[in-house]
């Protein structure tokens, strides 16, 4: 039984759960909005430096002891409940662009954010990604170079306990090996190896933010194979690790306190408070010297747009008019089928081999491609057994016939930044606090379509060489997003053409930093979390210097 007192403290009776005080702290050094990978790292770094930090997150704090039950929920047939609890009213959204964007298909609101259910692949962006316009005439250039992020990439790999072999001939230069050894290639990767060699495709290992051997933070991966959407063992990194570090450094982390708006001073030069709501419907103001919004590529621009004022009638930090603009994602291209021999799919829940051979763009005809060799094609033995009506020997035969001969390739394809792709507010629909929901305006351009077609050509060549009976293709017409929300508060040196500067501080407000993939200028074709982590560490350094 739960009751809520008028002071904002939630009393939980008979459950053994400690009381939670959600009233604001006295004015602190740093207020961080969002407890995902960006917010978690910023909070851990700044609290370790001795600063008073408060973290506010819209979602709940999930009990790590429940992860095995969440895995079982994922595996159990006929169960429609999401693995990570959602709230349809809280998480409502619109999608009015040319292409429907299923926003809630892959986002988690809660302490840990998207890393609770991500797959855990982490690689550095290529040098060309930071100078795309100069090198190819497409997209735009970042105001920083790869070398500016190089030391932060190394630090991020340490923070995320990345396992890798440093064997990628196409990757940008690095100073030292990955912190942990790489996972060995899967059995199906070995099947692909000869076919790739025959068609001239170079392959290499995949850096993963999961333990290939035990560390002080977690055990080695034990192969549950359910990495997405849940890792019961904790071997895969998630941002609760850094939230725990921040709390050990006396940071205060509040869950279920969605920030409604940011307020600023009379001159419109500094943020003064984050106004947040508690589960009992009360609103409070958290004051701080510095503010960091790390709420992702959708909720970060939404919060800024919700914080409009007389000084900022189009939204906070939006004098450029670009808050929410240049929304990007990665597109998926894939192909798969069956072989007349065992492939042992589903033994590994993540990728162990990929290829960046077709990553750099030779001209302006296409964007970047990251080719993947999937380890989770077809049904698993558990999928078949739990969904079958047979028993005993009949069930065993059904499993033998349905499992183990599937194989597949995937690819992440770069989408160029386009002004018309955006996150805006939909005033015709509101969330559980009466705020306009985010409206995702998204479309697919001709260059990205050509790149998806090229990825499919390469995949078909490899699969045919391997002797695969191709049964399905994901191409330009049925492609979908990778749910990597990027570019909606882009970085730059010109305040008229960007939202934040190279320190990730907004041009308009001197004490407001935006951390995460929303500041990306281009998206490349790399999973974005390592770059999010590197930029967050960089932002924390700059904030520490100002404090």
Image (tube, helix red, strand yellow):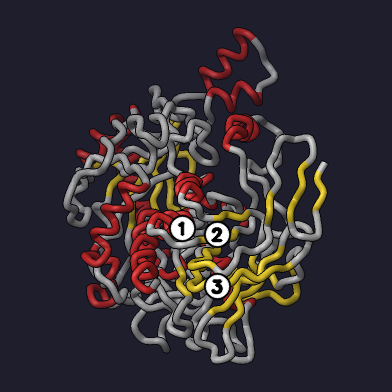
Mark 3 vs mark 1: give the one in front: 1
Which x, y percent locates residue 389?
Answer: 70, 19
Q: CA distance from mark 3 to mark 1?
A: 20 Å
Q: Where, by quadrant of the figure, is residue 515 drawn?
A: bottom left
Residue 297 visible (yes or no): no
Tell me the number on the disc at residue 55.
2
Tell me the number on the disc at residue 301.
3
Which secondary structure, mark 1?
A: helix
Which x, y percent locates residue 124?
Answer: 30, 55
Q: CA distance from mark 2 to mark 1?
A: 7 Å
- Say whether residue 314 is left or right of residue 22: left
Which x, y percent locates residue 269?
Answer: 50, 87
Which secondary structure, mark 2?
A: strand
The image shows residue 93, relative to residue 354, as above or below, that is below
Residue pictured at 65% horizontal, 75% vertical? 425
Q: Where, by quadrant of the figure, is residue 532 drawn?
A: bottom left
**Of 361 and 117, the residue lying toward us:** 117
Residue tagged 1? 43
């Amino acid at each position: 039984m739960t009751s809520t007192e008028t002071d904002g403290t939630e009393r939980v009776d008979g459950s053994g759960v400690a009381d939670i005080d959600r009233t604001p702290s006295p004015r602190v050094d740093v207020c961080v909005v969002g407890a995902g990978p960006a917010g978690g790292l910023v909070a851990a770094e700044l609290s370790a430096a001795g600063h008073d930090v408060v973290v506010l997150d819209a979602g709940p704090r999930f009990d790590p002891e429940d992860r095995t039950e969440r895995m079982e929920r994922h595996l159990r047939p006929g169960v429609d409940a999401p693995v990570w609890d959602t709230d349809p009213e809280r998480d409502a959204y619109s999608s009015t662009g040319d292409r429907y964007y299923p926003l809630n298909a892959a986002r988690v609101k809660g302490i840990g954010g998207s890393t609770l259910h991500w797959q855990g692949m982490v690689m550095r962006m290529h040098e060309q990604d930071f100078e795309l316009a100069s090198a190819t005439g497409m997209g735009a250039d970042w105001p920083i170079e790869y070398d500016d992020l190089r030391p932060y990439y190394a630090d991020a790999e340490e923070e995320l306990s990345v396992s890798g072999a440093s064997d990628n001939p196409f990757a940008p230069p690095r100073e030292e090996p990955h912190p942990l050894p790489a996972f060995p290639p899967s059995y199906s990767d070995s099947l692909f190896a000869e076919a790739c060699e025959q068609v001239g495709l170079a392959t290499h290992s995949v850096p993963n933010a999961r333990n290939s051997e035990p560390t002080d933070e977690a055990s080695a991966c034990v192969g549950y194979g359910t990495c997405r959407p849940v890792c019961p063992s904790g071997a895969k990194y998630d941002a609760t690790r850094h939230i725990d570090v921040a709390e050990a450094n006396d940071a205060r982390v509040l869950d279920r306190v969605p920030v409604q708006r940011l307020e600023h001073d009379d001159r419109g030069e500094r943020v003064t408070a984050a106004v947040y709501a508690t589960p009992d419907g009360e609103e409070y103001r958290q004051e701080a010297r510095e503010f960091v919004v790390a709420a992702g590529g959708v909720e970060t621009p939404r919060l800024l747009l919700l914080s409009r004022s007389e000084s900022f009638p189009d939204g906070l930090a939006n004098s450029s008019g670009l808050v929410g603009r240049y929304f990007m994602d990665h597109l998926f291209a894939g192909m798969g089928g069956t072989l007349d021999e065992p492939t042992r799919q589903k033994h590994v829940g993540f990728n162990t081999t990929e290829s960046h051979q077709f990553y750099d763009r030779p001209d302006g005809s296409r964007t970047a491609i990251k080719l993947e060799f999937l380890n989770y094609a077809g049904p698993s033995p558990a999928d078949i057994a739990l969904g079958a009506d047979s028993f005993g020997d009949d069930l065993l035969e059904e499993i033998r016939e349905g499992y183990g001969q599937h194989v597949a390739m995937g690819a992440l394809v770069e989408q160029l930044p386009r002004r018309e792709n955006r996150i805006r507010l939909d005033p015709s629909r509101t969330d559980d606090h009466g705020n306009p929901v985010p409206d995702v305006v998204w479309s697919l351009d001709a260059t990205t379509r050509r790149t998806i077609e090229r990825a499919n050509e390469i995949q078909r060549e490899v699969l045919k060489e391997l002797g695969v009976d191709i049964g399905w293709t994901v191409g330009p017409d049925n492609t979908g997003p990778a749910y990597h929300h990027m570019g909606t508060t882009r970085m730059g040196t010109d305040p008229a053409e960007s939202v934040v500067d190279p320190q990730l501080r907004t041009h308009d407000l001197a004490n407001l930093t935006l951390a995460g993939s929303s500041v990306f200028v281009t998206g490349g074709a790399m999973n974005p979390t390592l770059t999010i982590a590197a930029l967050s560490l960089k932002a924390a350094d700059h904030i520490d210097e100002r404090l």
